[in-house]
Image: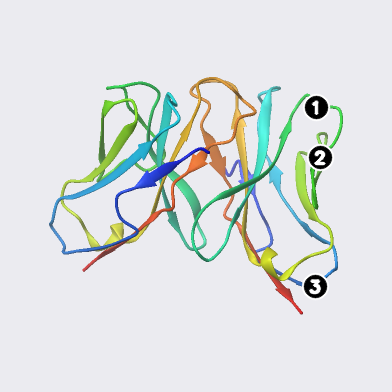
């Protein structure tokens, strides 16, 4: 069973608008972490934001915020005021604390920002 | 500034060749990882290592092996390359046991097997 699900293969947004990229996850571990990464066409993976399962508040980093709904097991990324440079693949990932604690990635969402 | 480097950005090999992909990190991280990335499949873990000479299989280890003789270097080996191993390969490293710490990725190697 998939542990991380990103249901949107692609999203379009106009410059300066906000956009939400969906991510749901599946775990029975009470302690886990959720990450979002951006991958531009050049290929490098850029860390954007982190949310811990015990964090009381939603994480924010500049224009990025994470809408964390623990009961629904969702961790959606919100990008405010989109810019042309935001066009990229976006990956949601989860790390459970048990075992070797590796990252499991979703399949990604391609975001295209138009002028 | 943290840095993970990979030996090649682009690589073209023939079927049956032995292929070495090298990854070096300068952050003294204990954990190192190899992923492959394919369109529509996201990143899938091939192997990881949590210490020198230690290795663990990830989700798709078949057809691959790894070597970690020094802490900073983690090599991915394709013993006999096949066309279905054409992919983007990403190396990453992370400090030990910090749940909130991100993995730091290399720039990736795009491998084409003909």
Task: Determine the residue located farthest toward the front in the rendered image.
Answer: B1
In the rendered image, residue B99, in percent from the top left (x then y), is placed at: 61, 25
* Badge 2: residue crowd in 10 Å (few <14, some 14–19, many ≥20): many
- Label placed on residue A68: 2
Mark 3 = which residue?
A15
Which of labels 2 and 1 is toward the front? 1
Task: Determine whether B44 is above or below A113 in the image.
Answer: above
Task: Determine whether B70 is above or below A88 in the image.
Answer: above
Distance of mark 1 from mark 3, alpha carbons? 31 Å
Please name the residue shown 46% across and 40% down the image: B3
Q: Which residue occupies the foreground of this view, A47 or A9?
A: A47
Which of labels 2 and 3 is toward the front? 3
Mark 1 = which residue?
A55
Q: Secondary structure at mark 3?
A: loop
Give the quarter of the figure containing the C terminus of chain A: bottom right
Distance of mark 2 from mark 3, alpha carbons? 25 Å
Please name the residue shown 76% across and 38% down the image: A73
Instruction: Give the mark nearest the N terminus, 2 or 3.
Output: 3
Q: Quick check: B93 left or right of B8? A: right
Q: Secondary structure at mark 2?
A: strand
Task: Read off the chain for label 2.
Answer: A
Instruction: Give the mark nearest the N terminus, 2 or 1.
Output: 1
Please name the residue shown 75% across and 67% down the image: A83
* Tags 1 and 3 touching, CB below 8 Å: no
* Badge 1: residue crowd in 10 Å (few <14, some 14–19, many ≥20): few
Q: Are marks 2 and 3 on the same chain?
A: yes
- Label placed on residue A95: none
């Amino acid at each position: 069973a998939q542990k991380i699900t990103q249901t949107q293969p692609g999203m379009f947004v106009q410059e300066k608008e906000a956009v939400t990229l969906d991510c749901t996850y599946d775990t029975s571990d009470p302690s886990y972490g959720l990450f979002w990464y951006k991958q531009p066409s050049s290929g490098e993976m850029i860390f954007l934001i982190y949310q811990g399962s015990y964090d009381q508040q939603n994480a924010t980093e500049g224009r990025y915020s994470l809408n964390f709904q623990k009961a629904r097991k969702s961790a959606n990324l919100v990008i405010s005021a989109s810019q042309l440079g935001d066009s990229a693949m976006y990956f949601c990932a989860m790390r459970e604390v048990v075992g070797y604690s590796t990252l499991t990635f979703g399949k990604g969402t391609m975001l295209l920002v138009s002028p | 500034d943290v840095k993970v480097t990979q030996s090649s950005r682009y690589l073209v090999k023939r079927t049956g060749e032995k292929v070495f992909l090298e990854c070096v990190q300068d952050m003294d991280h204990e954990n190192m990882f190899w992923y492959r990335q394919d369109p529509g499949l996201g990143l899938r873990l091939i192997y990881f290592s949590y210490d020198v000479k230690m290795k663990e299989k990830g989700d798709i280890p078949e057809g691959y092996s790894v070597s970690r003789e020094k802490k900073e270097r983690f090599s991915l080996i394709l013993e006999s390359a096949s066309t279905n191993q054409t992919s983007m390969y990403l190396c990453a490293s992370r400090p030990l046991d910090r749940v909130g710490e991100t993995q730091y990725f290399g720039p990736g190697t795009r491998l084409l097997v003909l």
